[in-house]
């Protein structure tokens, strides 16, 4: 669920793709960070930065930005295990401008900034923690950014929370038959948390590549539960010490899909600031440099500021992201359709995905088609994708027009998710 900006050329794209293949982390010969294997924690030796920008004073245990508003320190981080990490930072700052954030894959030829922690404000704090930052195994060129003159950092640690799980099963659908047949589904007829044989909980508050506000929790019925034959994903404001909590469910680590008809029946929320989505992400995704080359199909995205709070009338968006077409290049392929009463009436959102193309529909009305299968950059969609359902708060698109201050909770209600093949 990423959003568009502007353009670039295809010749450059091929070189970018080859570069990023080379950028996949490889085993490190000489790690520049101390690794405590027993605790799965990697601690930076802060004095051993390889380059910097800004004026710093350095001791054996502390680095401080002594002048100027911003600066950074570069390191090589050696990651032994691919997964989602907790980032623990011990730091102090003099005022509200003080913050620390961590950039991964610096100097990548996409010209992108991979912020894997979000801005960690330091006012009144001596330590900050961010959960869920994705890191592939191998060497990572990173920068620790300091904001605010006088901001100092004395420790940065990366603690493994969840090891990356390979998906053991892929369902590849036959698309040559005459009738649709369900090959996988969740009707949400149970109670309590969603079926963990079908769904994995994504976890954390690192911003999710879009500067989102929510902390995605796991195994917490308040944020994700089955109730009255539906899945309810519910966000809550100022909960668990977080700005927002919510949930994001994915079939990654359980099952992935290649081709088929994928649809879900849902109600999505109104009010400015929310961002509801049902989508797929390439199963090859491990960390941020995987995207958009792994491919993404947005079956339905809805942002609250496009919906009338009274009538529930709004807009559904469908799109694809891949190496040839995505937001950084400004050539993002997307379609939009007006939908009545999205909030109080169930609508069926889906895609038909074949080897020849992808068509999106709402309530059987097609409104978007993507069919560029000409190159690997344009068509990663011959590879497995996993399904994701989530409710984000704020972020680059959801929060583009601010947050409704009266909003304290929101829900996306899903009746079912179904995957079909032909027979």
Image (cartoon, rainbow, N blue to C red):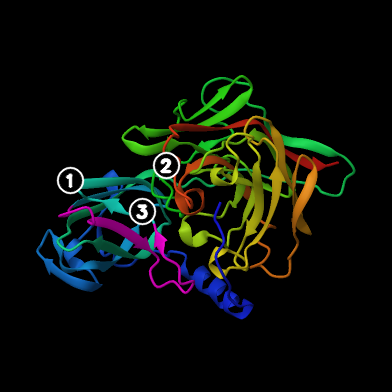
Q: What element carries label 3?
A: loop
Q: Quick one: which residue is furthest to the left in this view? A: 59
Where residue 69 sits, quadrant-wise, is bottom left
Where residue 226 sits, quadrant-wise, is top right
Query: Quick one: label 1 or label 3, which is nearer the N terminus?
Result: 3
Instruction: Say few, some or many: other residues with alpha carbon within 10 Å of mark 3 (under 14 / 14 to 19 / 20 or more).
Output: many
Query: As drawn, is 49 to the left or to the right of 161?
Result: left
Indicate whether residue 384 is drawn in magenta: no
Res 38 seen here = no
What secondary structure predominates along the stretch shown in magenta?
loop
From the image, tell me which residue sits under label 2.
Answer: 214
- Image location (x, y in percent) of residue 325: 62, 66
Where residue 65 sits, quadrant-wise, is bottom left
Q: Is mark 2 on a helix, strand or loop?
A: strand
Spatial CA distance of label 1 from label 3 is 18 Å
From the image, tell me which residue sits under label 1.
Answer: 124
From the image, tell me which residue sits under label 3.
Answer: 118
- Image location (x, y in percent) of residue 328: 53, 67
Residue positioned 76% across, 52% down in the render? 367
Query: Quick one: label 3 or label 2, which is nearer the N terminus?
Result: 3
Query: As drawn, is 196 to the left or to the right of 331?
Result: left
Query: Quick one: label 2 or label 1, which is nearer the N terminus?
Result: 1
């Amino acid at each position: 669920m990423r959003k568009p900006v502007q353009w670039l050329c295809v010749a450059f794209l091929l070189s970018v793709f080859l570069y990023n293949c080379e950028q996949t982390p490889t085993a490190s010969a000489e790690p520049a960070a101390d690794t405590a294997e027993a605790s799965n924690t990697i601690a930076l030796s802060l004095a051993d930065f390889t380059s910097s920008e800004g004026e710093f004073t350095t001791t054996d245990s502390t680095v401080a930005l002594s002048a100027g508003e911003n600066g950074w320190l570069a390191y090589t981080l050696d990651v032994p295990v691919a997964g989602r990490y907790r980032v623990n930072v011990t730091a102090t700052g003099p005022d509200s401008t003080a913050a620390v954030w961590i950039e991964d894959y610096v100097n990548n030829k996409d010209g992108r900034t991979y912020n894997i922690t979000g801005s960690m404000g330091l006012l009144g704090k001596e330590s900050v923690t961010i959960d869920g930052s994705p890191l592939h195994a191998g060497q990572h060129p990173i920068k620790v950014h300091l904001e605010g003159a006088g901001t100092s950092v004395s420790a940065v640690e990366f603690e493994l929370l969840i090891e990356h799980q390979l998906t053991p099963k892929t369902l590849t659908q036959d698309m040559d038959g005459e009738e649709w047949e369900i090959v996988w589904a969740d009707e949400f007829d149970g109670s309590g948390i969603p079926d963990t044989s079908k769904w994995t909980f994504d976890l954390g508050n690192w911003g999710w590549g879009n500067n989102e506000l929510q902390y995605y929790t796991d195994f917490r019925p308040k944020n994700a539960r089955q109730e009255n034959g539906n899945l309810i994903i519910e966000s809550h404001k100022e909960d668990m010490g977080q700005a927002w909590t919510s949930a994001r469910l994915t079939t990654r680590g359980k099952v992935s899909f290649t081709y088929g008809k994928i649809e879900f029946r849902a109600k999505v929320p109104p009010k400015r600031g929310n961002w509801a989505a049902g989508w797929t992400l390439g199963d090859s995704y491990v960390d941020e440099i995987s995207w958009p080359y792994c491919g993404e199909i947005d079956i339905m995205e809805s942002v609250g500021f496009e919906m009338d709070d009274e009538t529930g009338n709004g807009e559904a968006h469908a799109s694809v992201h891949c190496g040839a077409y995505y937001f950084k290049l400004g050539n993002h392929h997307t379609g939009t359709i007006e939908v009545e009463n999205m909030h109080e009436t169930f609508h069926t959102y889906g895609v038909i995905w074949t080897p020849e193309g992808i068509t999106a529909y709402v309530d059987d009305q097609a409104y978007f088609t993507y069919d560029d299968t000409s190159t690997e950059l344009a068509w990663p969609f011959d590879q497995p994708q996993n399904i994701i359902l989530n409710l984000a708060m704020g972020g680059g698109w959801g929060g583009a027009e601010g947050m409704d201050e009266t909003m304290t909770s929101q829900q996306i209600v899903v009746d079912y998710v179904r995957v079909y093949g032909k027979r």
